Image (cartoon, rainbow, N blue to C red):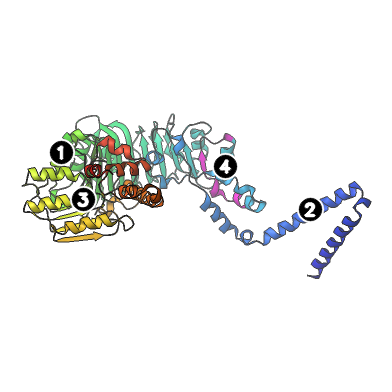
Amino acid sequence: MADIRFTCSDAASLLAKLRNSCREWSLTDLDRIEDELLHTISDVRVSINAQRPVNRLPVEILSEIFHQVLPPFQLASYLKSLSPQSFLVWDPFFDFKDTDALLPLTHVCRWWRDVALDTPTLWTTLFGSSHSAAIDEYRLRSKSAPLKVLNVENKHLDVQQLWRTDGQRIQSLASKTGCDPGLHMSYAQGLHALVARGCLLQGDVSNLKALTLWAVDWHLPSTPINLTHLFLAKRRLRVVDLFRILSIAPRLEDLGLYRISAEEAFDPHGDIPAVALQHLRRLAIHYPDRNIVSGLFSHVGLPARLAVNFENCEVSDLRWLVPLTQNDVKFVCISALKSSVIAAGPSKAVRFSGKRDSSTGAQWIAALLSYFQSEDIWIANTYKKDEFDEAIIKHTPWVETLHLGFIDFTTMVKILEKNPAYWPRLTKVALSHAHDISGMLKLAETRYRMGRPLKEFECHERPSIFHEEYSQDLKKIRHYVSVVRLIKDYAIALPLPDVCTDGVPSPWFQWPKRLVSDICDNLDVSMQRLREVSEVIHVSTGSKLRHWVNSTDSTLRLVIAFSHVCMWSIFTEFELALPDYTDDRKRGV
């Protein structure tokens, strides 16, 4: 401590001398003094920084911090026709990082730069559109660490050359540009995840866990005993060849088929290998081929717990796209917005999705509901068309409980008044939103007049959204329904089996978790904001705006809210049911 005080005293004396007699010093002497002081100050700052807690961290901890701040690679701007998730399918297997984001960290101080450059796992993502010099530098910095290679535009990355020189280090590879002449897996024994497009795949893939092939000619390799995720797209092949692929992948958990078509009709008596996929949890088939799907469900051993997703189905195909028996089904969910029907039980579920065309919606309902005779029906939304709503009501005579999202109560009441025999066993209705509780009042009153009153009614809504007008309608509903409950939470959760939603499903395997989707979350937020704004400007505009915003059945109210979340076009395109605002017009709202 004495030495420090002495040094400080000398420095103070020197500074005082400079101030008092600076003219006595030559310019050369002053330059030398300045240089010495700058070096001294720099040394002091280095000493100070070295004592700070962040610079006293062990190398391992600082390196882990760098790993945590390294962002995922933003692939969306490089893909034109597909989202990054749809291209990679199971992107957690690849874990591509934006290596360029490390560069600012390496310029903070020498200590940080040394730690970053001496941590090979920070530099393992190689991206084809990076500068060629950067690719070479990152490859050197990664030393012997496993590489993650992403090639979209094929600008500066020679995948074939890298495959030959560093193939044993490549842990994951996603290539959108195609490979000529192909990928021979003998170069990459450590490969765990692969996305390949327009090339020839051959050799041993026994270490692969996730495999996505876009228009790839796959020469059957040795048994892929570790393969758990397989996605095949845009290929014509023989049914027996597909079965051979499945027969050598006994651990498959997720299987996706996109535009996979059969070259010939399925022959159930042909030379078909035995296939047992006892670990399969999820199966997604887009544009299903009749020969392939019929073979899957007749000749493949499937587990007791399974979720199947069919996209872009035709109405005529529904009779053979049914892997569930009637006893497996506990509830059916209908969504006009998604043009889908879900049938599910405790351990199995199947989702059908067709073209978003209201003209064929009634055919969908007739074909599916006649098979799945469930007492529990969930309706997320409907088209504002009599034939669609009537198809639902007509083909569900056994329904006892209805769970409703956004529907057209006016059409429903009209159909029930015209056909009193419909829904003879209906006793309970659960409404996921109070947005049209006045419509529910009309339904309850109609059932009461018909001599078939409801026994239970549940209304789900957020406390922040629920307001006095809803309470008044609930009081009126109690005149016609024995038990009325207001549940102040949000949106009814679909009782799907865990196999539908656990783990990391691919973007080609889409299942809603709630009856009403996130679009309604945005609606609730928007309407709450509108109420807050109306309170602020109430003084200058009078009570009309506040009354308009709080209106329970105004289509204009929905238009403004959905404009706020840029979703109104969806409702107009698909002609979804919206509440009637006739009463509001009469009141001048």
Secondary structure under the numbered disc 4 in the rendered image: helix
Q: Residues within 10 Å of mark 1 (few under 14, many from 20)?
A: some
Q: Which amino acid type is shown beneath numbered disc 2? A: His
Disc on res. 138: 4
Q: Kindly check if marks 4 and 3 are in contact, taking CB atoms under 8 A apart as contact.
A: no
Q: Earlier in the sequence, mark 2 or mark 3?
A: 2
Crowding at dot 3, Cα within 10 Å, few <14 / some 14-19 / many 20+, comes out as many
Q: Are marks 3 and 1 in contact (CB under 8 Å)?
A: no
Does the image show residue 319? Answer: no
Q: Which one is in front in this view, the residue at disc 2 or the one at disc 3?
A: 3
Q: Which mark is residue 39?
A: 2
- Marks 4/1: CA–CA distance: 63 Å
Report crowding for label 2: few under 14, some 14 to 19, many 20 or more residues within 10 A (C-alpha).
few
Marks 2/4: CA–CA distance: 34 Å
Q: Label 2, label 3: how many angstroms apart (C-alpha)?
A: 80 Å
Q: Earlier in the sequence, mark 1 or mark 2?
A: 2
* Image quadrant occupied by the C terminus: top left
Q: Which of these two is toward me, 438 or 121?
A: 438
Of labels 4 and 1, earlier in sequence is 4
**Residue 438: numbered disc:** 3
Name the amino acid type tagged 3.
Ser
Residue 31: percent from the left, percent from the top?
86, 48
Which segment is the magenta one? Answer: 115-132
Q: Is residue 118 magenta?
A: yes
Label 3 SS? helix
